[in-house]
Image (cartoon, helix red, strand yellow):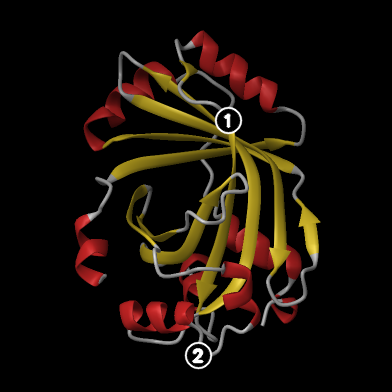
Amino acid sequence: MESKLKDNIIQKRFERKFAERLNNSYLFKKFLILRNFSKKYNQRVINSLYFDDLNFTSFKDNIDGNPRRFKIRIRWYDENIENLYLEIKNKYGFLGWKNTIKLSNINYLKKDLKNYSNSQLEKTLNKIFKKNVFPILKTKYLREYYENPYNNIRATIDTKLEFSSVRTYFNIKYDKEILEFKYPISKDKLFRECIISKNNFRFQKFSKYVVGINLLNRNLLI
């Protein structure tokens, strides 16, 4: 499994994020259309389950501004909980890349979470990361996909964000919507000069995992 994880790596790319108040995603869409972006795929619901150790190392690395950091999550789309993907989301400044593998040996996620200790899921993650990690936070949101076909620059718009504690099931809705650009390192100059210049959006450091923990309070999470 570890070898498969290392082999399935998305190339390093810039990831630029912007946040806007709730129900204002139409501003993002207008911005994209004016810059020749069009819809790439059908929208879908993205579910992510984040893991961390008991010291909240991934959370603290982000808060402390550690340029090299990573997050562990399991992701599935819409209600298709049978197709689970383990992702290691790596960040170095604004550069991001991830390792992905399909979890074929997890038969029933909810059961494994309820009885996480000594479950197959715990054993699998411990084998990969060589340390104990625990399910902390679940996120859910609706994602729309756009692309500028001339420049190989992609954009996504995330709305209807929700954060849930795995332990208490407490749920909270988020009052912002997120626009994110993803593009190869070689396109950074073009992006700055032709796509994002002369606009009112400003890059923001934004992590759904960090936002969710801050909103829910760590006492609710472990």
Residue at point 37% right, 16% down?
Answer: 194
Q: Nearer the viewer, mark 2 or mark 1?
A: 2
The numbered mark at residue 60 is none
Location of residue 50 in the rendering, given as x and y in whole percent from the top left corner: 54, 66
Residue type highlighted by circle 2? Asn
195 and 168: which is toward the camera: 168
Residue behind mark 1: 43
Location of residue 95 in the rendering, given as x and y in whole percent from the top left corner: 33, 48
Q: Marks 2/1: CA distance?
A: 36 Å
Which is more N-terminal, label 1 or label 2? 1
Image quarter of residue 105: bottom left
Q: Is residue 169 visible?
A: yes
Location of residue 17 in the rendering, given as x and y in whole percent from the top left corner: 51, 40
Residue at the far front in the pictured view: 107
Residue behind mark 2: 118
Quadrant of the image for the C terminus? bottom right
Question: Helix, strand or loop at disc 2?
Answer: loop
69 and 167: which is toward the camera: 167
Residue at point 54% right, 44% down?
Answer: 204
Mark 1 residue crowding within 10 angstroms, few (<14) / some (14–19) / many (20+) = some
Quick check: 27 left or right of 53? right
